[in-house]
Image (cartoon, rainbow, N blue to C red):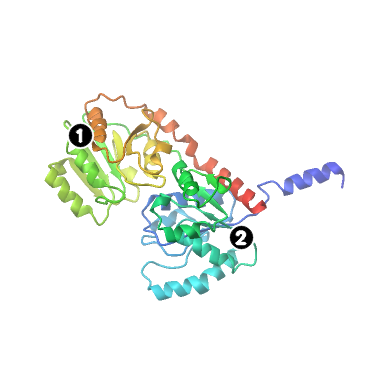
Amino acid sequence: MTAELKRMFYKKRNSKDMILMKVAILVGEITGRGGMETVISKMVSNYNARYKGEMKLFLIGGSRDESWLKNINEDDYYILNHSDENKIKRYLKCVFIAPKELRKFNPDVLMAADEKSIMFAKMLSRFINKKIKVVSWIHFSISKIKPQYRKFMKQADAHFAISDGIKKELINLSIADQKNVYLVYNPIEISNQIIKRPEDNVHFVYVGRLIYGGQKRVNDLLTALSKIEGNWRLTVIGDGEDRDRLTTLAESLGINHKISWLGWQKDPWKCIDHATALLLTSQFEGFPMVLLEAMSKGIPCVSSNCPVGPSDIIIQNKNGWLYPMDDLNKLVEILQSIVDNKLDLPDYLEIQQTVERFDVKAFTENIRSVFLQLVKN
């Protein structure tokens, strides 16, 4: 073989398209109706469309609603436990069946999507006869994780930070250092659909879990809207244990007649004909996909500047507005300006363009490059 042929042979053999590298995603118990499920389904589907059979989802704790899994090829996920099974059965499956199934898949990387799964991933890696890299992939503020679980996170070989805020938390809390934290924003498929604004009134939209106080602080949203004068309405898409409490609050504030409560919807955007702005009043987030989803359809967003995520997505006056967390007066000021038509709303296409950097195709290429780098080291 000539020197030139050797160079061509090794170049082809070592190209990223020729290397088979398997990634197992481990997830604890989830609801099946959150933003994380949307991200995971997009990630697995798009990754395996590009690199067939290299990624597989392992639902360690099960999903209360399994309908979202229809977006993933059946060969690309494995349900270890179902949420209605008793604790003893679930534990035995984790001890005896999980190692067997993972060994069969033979991963090079274990990617843990929650703090407990990191501990489980390190344990499982000992049962597979090869060196496996463990990567954390947390979807909410690290500050909300109990200290006893943070120590398990330190055992990960690398960390995917889905927002700049999470990256800073990982470093500031001494869980990781700069060299093993990778800023990898969650992906979105850019939509060709535009949801236009109504001409005769202002239509606000909320999409998410119905939590009074707590993470989502939907009570703040209702309280702020009760102070808004003029022609507006609100559509609420989502459900939760606090729904009755929130509808009662809306009644007491005298605004329930302006609100449509649609409950949880598999595809919320099909329920919305027109929208002026999407509202988010959270106390904390990880990387709120609902903001990206709204912007991909040309809808500007108003969000609290909570830790973490909104400040990575919202570009002031170009695709939405941030207000200081806990500052309801500022939120009221922004919403009143929208209702009074004193705030220039960005153009639909300009809003869409601001989220092109989160396109799922670029995301897939980026994370595979990181995986290759980790396995090589």
- Farthest right residue in view: 2
For residue 51, side relative to residue 80 (left or right)? right
Q: Position of residue 358 (x, y in %)?
A: 48, 39
* Residue pictured at 37% horizontal, 26% vertical: 347
* Residue pictured at 64% horizontal, 53% vertical: 375
Q: Position of residue 194 (x, y in %)?
A: 37, 34
The answer to whether 60 is drawn above or below residue 232 in the figure is below
The answer to which quarter of the image holds residue 231 is: top left
Nearest the viewer among 274 and 373 is 373
N-terminal of the pair, mark 2 or mark 1, is: 2
Q: Position of residue 262 (x, y in %)?
A: 24, 48
- Callout 1, which amino acid? Trp
Nearest the viewer among 107 and 126 is 126
Residue 26 visible in the displayed image = no
Q: Position of residue 90 (x, y in %)?
A: 43, 72
Residue under pointer 1: 232
Which element type, helix, strand or loop, lies under badge 2?
Answer: loop
Label 1: few (<14), some or many (≥20) within 10 Å? some
Residue under pointer 2: 132
